[in-house]
Structure formats: structure tokens, C-alpha cells
Amino acid sequence: MNFKLLLRTTLNLLLCFAAATLAFSQQPATAKGQPPKQNAPSTIEQLTARYEKAGREAYDRRQDIFKAAAVKPGAVVADIGAGTGLFTMMFAEAVGPKGKVIAVEIEKRLTEHITRRAKEAGLANVETALCTERSVELAAGCADVVFLCDVYHHFNHAKDSMASIHRALRRGGELVLVEFKRIPGKTKEWIVKHVRAGQEVFTAEIEAAGFKKVEEKDFMDENYFVRFRKVERK
């Protein structure tokens, strides 16, 4: 091999290595495509401390949200993005032994935590299910109510996720949405940065997925409450 050929081969190898290194560095750091935060909670205890604490509006107004949801005894409620199970437990008590709550999460450690929490509370009507980023992974027509509390803005594939929610609801089933108000210049800066769109956009997306807005309640500062009803597709 002459010197020019050797030099050309070496340069090609270096360029390939550099391209591969650059491509790797641009890969998403997490499943949601965001780099992990240094202060992100890593244990159930830390998650509970973050989500079930005074100062978080969904926690402070949990009783008001619960009453507004108005779930009935005997109903089947799917708590999507159930987190640490705060509302799961409240709904389980409300629907009683003839109803049930399906707590849906993307992390197994959270579903396991909710199972333990329900057992400790003596609630035998709580089930758990693992979802994916594109589907809630629930059986067709299994739920009367789907509950989303500060979860919709996390959907990376909203169209697919909403299609799976539409399938999971029974005829005339309801979707209860609690979501952050995103109004640039008015709401907190972290909400504007964290939430990709405002109520008008999210409502349009949900209606396009086969739902009709039937009720809206304004009783929170940082969140809005909207009820949708499933519309059967022709």
C-alpha cells in the first residue's frame, strides 16, 4: 500500500469515527427525548414528595377535582398516568366494591407501588396496567371514565394515545381532563416552557380524536377542568 492510499484510508476511518460519535451524542437521553434532569426524583418516596405536597395545585385542590369528576358507584375508571396513585385511591373508594379503578402507568415501579398502596388501604377494586408511549394498552370498551390529570401534555404521540383512549371507553363514556393553563405572559414561565400548547389546541386535538366537550369548570388558578364525552365514529 503506497503512502497516499494509506493516508486516504486513515482519513476515511477518522471521518467515520467522528460521524458515529456525533450521531451517538445526538440520541435522546431518555425515552421521552429529553435529557435527564439532575434533580429528577428517582425513588417512590421522592416522587410522592414532589406530587403529593402542599403548593402543587392538583394536590391542594384534589377534593375539588374529585368532586368535579363526579364518578358514580359501580363505575370503571381508568386513571391514566396515575403516578403515585393519589386519585386512584380516591376514585376506588368512590366507585365502591361494584366498580373498579385501573391505574395506568408507563413505569412498572409505579404500578407496583399503587398495588401496594391499595392493599394497605384495603381497596380490592384497584387494578394496574402498563402503557406505552403510543397506547394506554386497555381493552376495548373497558372503562366508563378516563381521568387525565396533568398528563395530556406528556403525550408524545397524542393522536395515537387518544385513539387508544377512545377505544377503551364504552359508548357514551367520559374523559375528564385536568391540565395546566398555558398563557404566555400570564402563567408561570416553567409552565409555558414545559407544556407544549394551551387549552384551545389540546381541546381541538381531543375533539378530533372523537370526543365532544360537554362541561368546563373554572375553579383553579393554574389548571383547567374539562369533561368530554365519547362520540361514536361513523
Image (spheres, rainbow, N blue to C red):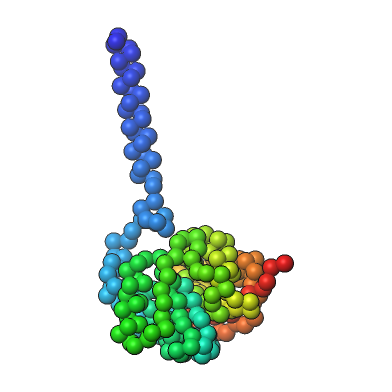
Which residue is at the far right?
A: 234
Q: Measured from the top left, where is residue 200 in percent x and y?
A: 61, 70
Q: How many marks?
A: 0
Which of the 4 image quarters holds residue 58?
Answer: bottom left
What residue lies at 50% left-to-right and 69% top-to-bottom? 138
Q: Measured from the top left, where is residue 122 in percent x and y?
A: 34, 88
Q: Nearer the viewer, residue 79 or 36?
A: 79
What residue lies at 35% left-to-right and 44% top-to-bottom? 25
Q: Measured from the top left, where is residue 125 in percent x and y?
A: 42, 83
The C terminus lies in which quarter of the figure?
bottom right
Judge whether residue 204 can be spotted in this image.
no
Q: Is residue 115 above or below residue 206?
A: below
Q: Is residue 131 above or below residue 149?
A: above
Q: Nearer the viewer, residue 126 or 23?
A: 126
Q: Is residue 19 above or below residue 220?
A: above
Judge whether residue 39 can be spotted in this image.
yes
What residue lies at 41% left-to-right and 80% top-to-bottom? 126
Q: Measured from the top left, where is residue 35 in percent x and y?
A: 36, 56
The N terminus lies in which quarter of the figure?
top left
Q: Nearer the viewer, residue 94 or 49?
A: 94
Which of the 4 image quarters holds residue 21?
Answer: top left
In the picture, measured across the screen, residue 214 lies left or right of residue 68, that is right
What residue lies at 60% left-to-right and 82% top-to-bottom? 216
